[in-house]
Image (cartoon, helix red, strand yellow):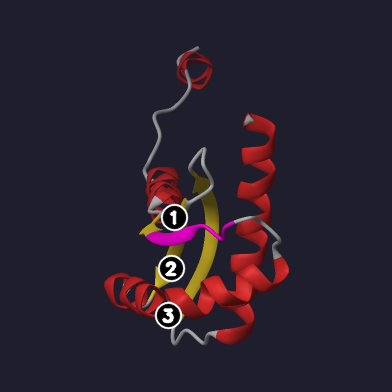
Amino acid sequence: MAKRQDRVNELLRREISGVLQRDFEWKNALVTVSDVDVTQDLKEAKVFVSILGGSAPGILDQLERKRGFIQGKVSKRVVLRNTPVLMFRQDKSAVRGVEVVNLLDEVSQLPTAPLEDEESSGSI
């Protein structure tokens, strides 16, 4: 069953991503579907959405309001006995990744101590 769940997860992720890309316009925000986690009985699916820029709570509210529309579009392209009920969650891993990269850039700007070989060669 795990292989089937994985295939359904990936298929739903691709289709939901397509719907969000074709039918929604996000002002000053990049919205991507990073993962989908469907339950074993395929009745519910958590959709993890990465949001860079924009208002994350506002975007999640809009997705929840348009859930029926999104499910309808997905059900036309994905043939399952029951279309899972979509529940949208924010995936903050992309934001954390950007923060880590920014911190690494800041660390690379800090002065470094001289290497031991440079110190010893100058004292001869």
Closer mark to the observer between disc 2 and disc 3: 3
**Disc 2 marks which residue?**
52
Q: Does the CB distance between marks 1 and 2 fall below 8 Å? A: yes
| Quarter occupied by residue 56 | bottom left
Q: Amino acid at mark 2?
A: Leu
The one of 103 and 63 positioned closer to us in this rendering = 63
Specify start and end residues of the magenta stretch as a single range. Answer: 82-88
N-term mark: 1 or 3: 3
C-alpha gap between disc 1 and disc 2 = 10 Å
**Disc 1 marks which residue?**
98
Q: Amino acid at mark 1?
A: Val
**Disc 3 marks which residue?**
66
Relative image position of residue 2 (x, y in whole percent): 62, 30
In the image, what residue occupies the spot 48% across and 51% down?
A: 43
In the image, what residue occupies the spot 47% across and 84% down?
A: 26
Residue 109 is covered by the magenta coloring: no
Q: Residues within 10 Å of mark 2 (few under 14, many from 20)?
A: some
Q: Which mark is residue 36?
A: none
